[in-house]
Image: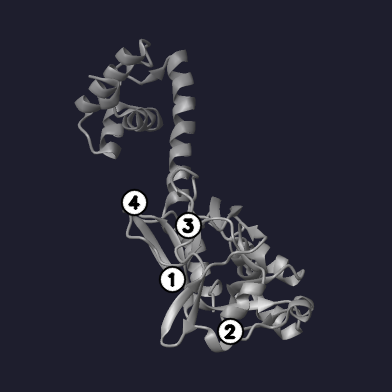
Amino acid sequence: MTRSEINRAREMEVFAQVVAQGGFSAAARVCRMTPSAVSKLVARLEMRLGARLVNRSTRALQLTPEGCAFYERTTRILADIEEAERGAGAGEQPAGRIRLNTSASYATHILAPILPEFLDRHPGITLDLVQTDMVVDLLAERIDVAVRAGPLKTSSLVARKLGDTAMIIVGAPEYLGRFGEPESIDDLDRHNRLGFGYVRKVDGWPMRKNNDIVVIPAVGRVQASDGEGLRQLALGGSGLARLAAFTVRDDIAAGRLVPVLEHLNPRDRETFHAIHIGQGGPLPSRIRALLDFLAERGKVC
């Protein structure tokens, strides 16, 4: 019998019952086995270990020193297995570490304000937050859950929609005072268009032109790796940026940013999803708790 064919956990369970019940017959009733099957299992275990674990007699079962040591370690291992199964079980209190990948924009404007509530609800959960706007390989980066914007490719990923948001071109009043507010697509030629430093699904700014939608390249002197970086550059007066409405709504209300070219806005919306790898079977309770919370409190609009 090869090592992979040995059910060591079952051997430990039966041996522990032999000790706990004080004999083979009583252990057999608990384990739903015959006494001879229990005896043979313990004998095979002793042969594999190369040590006698019990001294058999007609009166009582007595553990050898090796049997005592093995029994102590066996009970600890079985307890650890039971605890691990409880922790992974669908009905248990969620606990453990979650590695969450999201954009800096979502983390700043949506997640940060609601995170204390999630941590209060689930004191056994810890979060490892990985911020990037670029698409990462969940398996390679050991990501449990990712929040992604834009269309999803067909894959083994399971997605839960978190809503969608409008896109708006904005600039700081100070910047617009220096370079003027654009009124047409041609006016953008004299403006610094802040863009992303990596290729996106729609690599530019969609805009209405007559009855068509054209994509204007976001070419400028400054690029950033995430939307929150672009927002900060726009606030500082470095140029115009096309950003998700939920990230600049407060800035617009406070007068820190001004929408421009709204009459040419195609009113496209960017969809957000919380995704995880679909492997079948029930989700770990900690992952399900985060997904449920984001669907409840982490909506984008």
**Rounded to the nearest whole Å, what is the CA distance between mark 1 and mark 2?**
35 Å
Counting from the top left corner in percent of width and height, residue 254 is at 76, 83
Q: Nearer the viewer, mark 3 or mark 1?
A: 1
Image quadrant occupied by the N terminus: top left
Callout 4, which amino acid? Gln
Label disc, if present, on residue 184 of the rendered structure: 2
- Residue at image mark 4: 279
Q: Which residue corresponds to the image point at 26% horizontal and 30% vertical from the top-left?
A: 25
Question: Could you say which is closer to the camera, residue 62 or residue 238?
Answer: 238
**Above-or-below relation of 236 to 30:** below
From the viewer's side, name the closer residue of 289 and 127. Answer: 127
Q: Residue at x 30, y 29 (%)?
A: 7
Q: Is residue 280 left or right of residue 125?
A: left
Task: Indicate which disc, 1 or 4, sits on the residue closer to the N terminus.
Answer: 1
Q: Mark 2, mark 4: which one is toward the viewer?
A: 2
Label located before the other in sequence (1 or 2): 1
The amino acid type, in three-letter code, at marker 2 is: Ser
Tell me which numbered mark, 3 or 2, is placed earlier along the sequence. 2
Q: Up-down: is 110 above or below 52?
A: below
Q: CA distance from mark 1 to mark 4?
A: 19 Å
Instruction: Measure the C-alpha gap from mark 3 to mark 1.
Output: 16 Å
Residue 287 has which mark?
3
Mark 1 or 2, which is nearer the eye? 2
Residue 123 falls in image quadrant: bottom right
The answer to the question of whether label 1 and label 2 lie on touching residues, with beta carbons closer than 8 A, is: no
Asked whether the viewer can see residue 275, the reply is yes
Instruction: Give the residue displayed 59% in from the left and 64% down from the top.
Output: 219
Q: Nearer the viewer, residue 78 or 276?
A: 276
Name the secondary structure under disc 1: strand
Crowd class of label 2 (few under 14; some 14 to 19; many from 20; radius 10 Å):
few
**Residue under pointer 1:** 161
Give the class, few, some or many, for how many residues have Cα within 10 Å of label 4's Cα (few <14, many ≥20): few
